Image (spheres, helix red, strand yellow):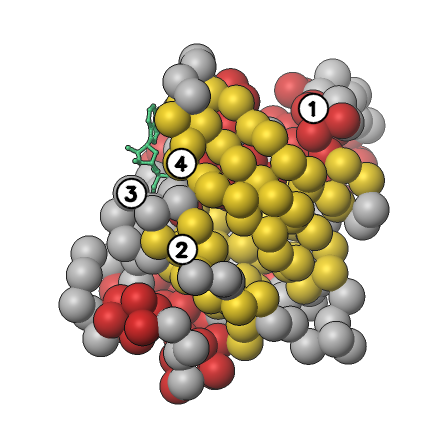
Amino acid sequence: MAARTVTDPKELAIFEVRDLWAYYNEKPAIRKVSLKIPEKKITAIMGPSGCGKTTFIRCLNRLHELTPGASIKGEILLRDKNILEMDPVLVRRKIGMVFQRPNPFPTMTIYDNVIAGYKLLGVRLKREEADRIVEEALRKAALWDEVKDSLHKRGTYLSGGQQQRLCIARALAVKPEVLLMDEPTSALDPKSTAKIEELIVELKRSVTIVIVTHNIAQAGRVADYTAFFYLGELVEFGPTSEIFTVPKDPRTEEFLKGKFG
Ligand SMILES: Nc1ncnc2c1ncn2[C@@H]1O[C@H](COP(=O)(O)OP(=O)(O)OP(=O)(O)O)[C@@H](O)[C@H]1O
């Protein structure tokens, strides 16, 4: 069945994915996916376990190809430039990622975690500049007030929810154009989850967000657009309000009713 890929024509697409295939040892996990991801919006990638959600977003910042035996075919245009032909380090600077489990660098302080991206890129920052970047990123991640007096303590001293916001600050510090989030709240309690969801909605003013979520209610709460994947294919894509109320494909409807995975 053909995928429905509707976005409001007034929305600017930051990504245009064309005929994307992604493989593990020649076995396809993503099959001929085409979609446009709108800029400064939140797009949720939804679907049952194993349908290719994580593989798909890992293609968007070229992490997929780091898996042994993995390969990609197709085009991923970031503002008309194919990222598959760009320097992967530059791609990952423009397209940040936050993972399922908070993963601050355990031996580093909160401060050093936030500017770790610059160190990895070999960029030397003056003290005042580093201070400014750290404060700005922690404020954007809604963590500044909680940590401003303990910047030189280790990141791992924070609670799980705070650690995840620290990881968001670390990703934001290098000023990405897109933030990919792979089930960012699945390891968190409801209160920390609510705080991160609030933050995600706030962040779309400055950055495009693509979020993988198992949680249908979460997609409904935060996402402007939703893509539904099944067995590596994009089944349906459109404004969340439409996908949730009038899904065009029976597989989307079944999923939304909780009938599988
Ligand atoms: N490193 C790997 N090597 C081989 N196959 C893999 C690897 N990672 C994922 N796969 C396979 O690719 C397919 C898509 O997996 P992926 O993790 O992208 O799905 P997902 O929708 O994110 O799943 P989940 O919701 O369970 O996290 C699955 O069939 C999975 O078994």
Ligand 1 appears in which quadrant? top left
In three-dimensional space, the C-alpha distance between marks 1 and 3, rounded to whole angstroms, equals 28 Å
Q: Earlier in the sequence, mark 1 or mark 3?
A: 3
Residue identified by numbered label 4 = 29
Q: Earlier in the sequence, mark 3 or mark 4?
A: 4
Q: Residue at x 69, y 24 (%)?
A: 88
Tell me if residue 16 comes above or below residue 64 in the rendering. below
- Per the rendering, the mark at residue 50 is 3
- Nearer to the camera, 27 or 37: 27
Q: Earlier in the sequence, mark 2 or mark 3?
A: 3
Q: Earlier in the sequence, mark 1 or mark 4?
A: 4
Residue identified by numbered label 1 = 89
Q: Residue type at mark 2?
A: Phe
Q: Is residue 212 left or right of residue 58?
A: left
Tell me if residue 171 comes above or below residue 108 in the rendering. below
Q: Secondary structure at mark 3?
A: loop
In three-dimensional space, the C-alpha distance between marks 1 and 4, rounded to whole angstroms, equals 24 Å
Q: Any atom of ligand 1 within 8 Å of the CB at mark 4?
A: yes
Q: Residue type at mark 4?
A: Ala
Q: Secondary structure at mark 2?
A: strand
- Per the rendering, the mark at residue 229 is 2
Q: Any atom of ligand 1 within 8 Å of the CB at mark 2?
A: yes
